Image (cartoon, helix red, strand yellow):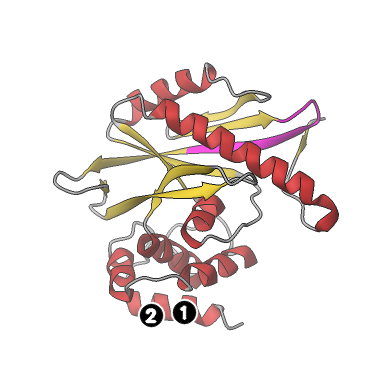
């Protein structure tokens, strides 16, 4: 049975940590480069790698999470599936694990026993005319994106699009508050830790509040300030 590989911790496993992280960045860079050649889509790195990009802290990464912003969901999934089927990254083999109407998941084989998981979550979003890099979701909310670097162990920089720091804080605050609309899973300790890292950055609180007020996961019938307050209170527990 192939075993999923999580990035290990501890000094004795430092070499494995570095190797797997470098592989992740190499893969993300290859995927991003191929997507850039296709009109109408943008790869936006999400999850823990987005947290790392925005904060500069090296984190443990169990999966490689991404969004694919597109104005045409059905056409883009077919295009991306074709790209991924023909993607060649030295030393890696990709196998399609799961496909839905808005999601593609791949096992990234490191060797005959170990693999990583790459997840492509498609999001209907249109680039806002006149804006630099902001997108409008179906519900009308605006998602600003920024291009940020992540360095591998040799100091090589890879640049990836991620959601802006205020929008990412908004997402994690809603999740950590425990009041999120249509939650996909329970709050993890890592979510709370990630929110703490994000809040240590430089941002305007009014931008976070604005992002929360239009966020698709913002709960109904409760104030944004109350959700934000509850999220920050959980950092103290």
Q: Residue at x 45, y 64 (%)?
A: 180
Q: Tell me, yes or no, whether the highlighted magenta stretch contains residue 112.
A: yes
- Image quarter of residue 52: bottom right
Label ID, residue 230: 1
Q: Quadrant of the C terminus?
A: bottom right
Query: Magenta part of the protein: which range?
Result: 110-120
Q: Main secondary structure of the magenta part?
A: strand
Residue under the image location 77 percent in, 34 percent down: 114
Residue 104 pos. (x, y %): 51, 32
Give the SS element for disc 1: helix
Task: Tell whether label 1 touches label 2 (CB within 8 Å).
Answer: yes
The answer to whether 158 appears left or right of 10 in the picture is left
In which quadrant is the N terminus drawn? top right
Asked whether residue 222 appears in the rendered view, the answer is no
Q: Nearer the viewer, residue 51 or 13?
A: 13
Q: Which mark is residue 83?
A: none
- Does residue 58 show up? yes
Q: Vertical placement of 85 versus 10: above or below?
A: above
């Amino acid at each position: 049975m192939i075993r999923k590989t999580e990035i290990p911790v501890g000094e004795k496993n430092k070499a494995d940590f570095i190797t797997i992280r470098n592989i992740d960045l190499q893969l993300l860079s290859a995927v991003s480069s191929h997507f850039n050649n296709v009109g109408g889509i943008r790869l936006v790195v999400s999850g823990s790698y987005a947290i790392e990009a925005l904060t500069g802290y090296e984190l443990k990464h169990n999966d490689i999470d991404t969004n694919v912003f597109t104005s045409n969901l059905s056409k883009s999934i077919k295009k991306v599936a074709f790209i991924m089927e023909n993607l060649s990254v030295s030393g890696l083999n990709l196998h399609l694990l799961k496909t839905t109407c808005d999601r593609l998941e791949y096992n990234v084989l490191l060797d005959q026993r170990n693999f990583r998981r790459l997840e492509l979550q498609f999001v209907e979003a249109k680039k806002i005319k006149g804006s630099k890099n902001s997108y409008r979701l179906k519900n009308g909310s605006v998602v600003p994106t920024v291009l940020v670097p992540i360095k591998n162990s040799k100091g090589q920089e890879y640049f990836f699009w991620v959601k802006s720091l205020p929008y990412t804080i908004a997402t994690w605050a809603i999740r950590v508050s425990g009041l999120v609309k249509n939650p996909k899973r329970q709050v993890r300790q890592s979510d709370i830790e990630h929110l703490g890292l994000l809040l240590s950055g430089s941002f305007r609180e009014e931008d976070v509040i604005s992002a929360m007020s239009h966020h698709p996961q913002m709960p109904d019938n409760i104030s944004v300030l109350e959700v934000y307050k509850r999220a920050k209170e959980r950092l103290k527990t």
